[in-house]
Image: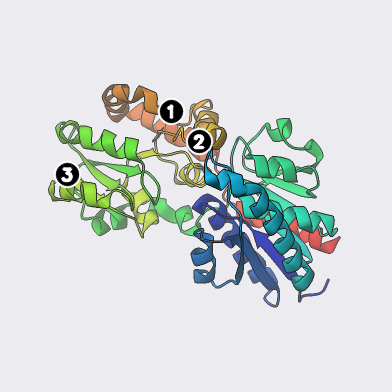
Amino acid sequence: MKQSINILISGGGTGGHIYPAIAIANELKLRYPDANFLFVGAKDKMEMEKVPQAGYEIKGLWISGIQRKLTLDNLSFPFKMISSLWNAAKIIRKFKPDVAIGTGGFASGSTLIMANRKGIPTLIQEQNSYPGITNKLLSKKAHKICVAYDNLERFFPADKIVKTGNPVRQDLLSIHSKTDEGKTFFKLDKTKKTILVLGGSLGARKINQLIENNLEFFKNQEVQVIWQCGKFYIDEYKKYDDLEHIQVHQFLNRMDLAYAASDIIISRAGASSVSELCIVGKPVIFIPSPNVAEDHQTKNAKSVADKHAAILLKESELETFPIVFETLLKDKGKQEYLSENIHELALPGATTDIVNEVEKLLKK
């Protein structure tokens, strides 16, 4: 097989689509140093910044999702779709990819539709336990579908599915040897339990309000909190960084050390977060966002909680948080049980397994 191959990758809109795309590209680049890579994303979305930062060229399409309520953006959607399909076809004609990979998002939809029409082998990577509309549509013509959860035959052709898991940061594989380093890095009291609170890079209002309402409760429980409140909320909550038992961060640059230092984790349930937390293997309370397509975060969290590997607490149930948290904090056996069960769900070789499937398509 020729070494100078052309690989087209499309995915974006959120970090959950962008990070897997970059991880797949990095692994392919290790195997094929002379390969040519081109990403396709949506104009004005975060991939237009993140992908070049990772060292790859990207082209932007004029495309966005349909809003849940009637807006002017929805009226422009048909024109955006036609434009994105037209420009995706132009990109494909010029780049001549040997394979096209989609990791989700509307730009991925337009790109892979046109790749399929040109007879180019396509692979889609579905991160969630409940697929979005784009990947459901693409699955009919895709050659291979890499998934992270069981029972997706309800949505995809069974003969195309390969369970690989989601790509995760490789530095998470060694966090259990970094506990002391993590506690030192965050200047923590090593005699106290540490709670890590994650609401995503932008932040999660309901989780932030929950933590704010329970600051005295955490103090009474003698726990210390690493609170990642997000870009949208740092100005509102940074005042609490003065409290002895609370650290407020907009963003955590050393996630490996934050995970290593923590004893219990409170988190949203995006696909990438769930996959990382399975690798981390710490007790988790998932508080999924209900404001996402198909309520997929709740479905992600439920798929783990149903295996007795995490606690699922819906936003509508947050008044029970103090009882749920205190019960878990005082039950070491429950903590160990959850840790063991969630770690068993880990798929640390996901990136390698996905790229193995890409290689099979290239060899055909």
At 32% across and 50% down in the image, what residue appears? 232
* Residue 262 image offset from top left, x and y in percent: 32, 45
Residue 312: numbered disc: 1
Q: Is residue 99 left or right of residue 310?
A: right
* Residue 347 image offset from top left, x and y in percent: 58, 46
- Badge 1: few (under 14), some or many (20 or more) residues near its Cα, within 10 Å? many
The amino acid at mark 3 is His
Q: Is residue 225 left or right of residue 102?
A: left
Q: Earlier in the sequence, mark 1 or mark 2?
A: 2
At 71% across and 34% down in the image, what residue appears? 155
Q: Secondary structure at mark 1?
A: strand
Q: Is residue 264 visible?
A: no
Of labels 2 and 3, the one closer to you:
2
- The residue at which mark 3 appears reads as 245
Q: Is residue 222 visible?
A: yes
Q: Earlier in the sequence, mark 2 or mark 3?
A: 3
Marks 2/3: CA–CA distance: 30 Å
Q: Secondary structure at mark 3?
A: loop
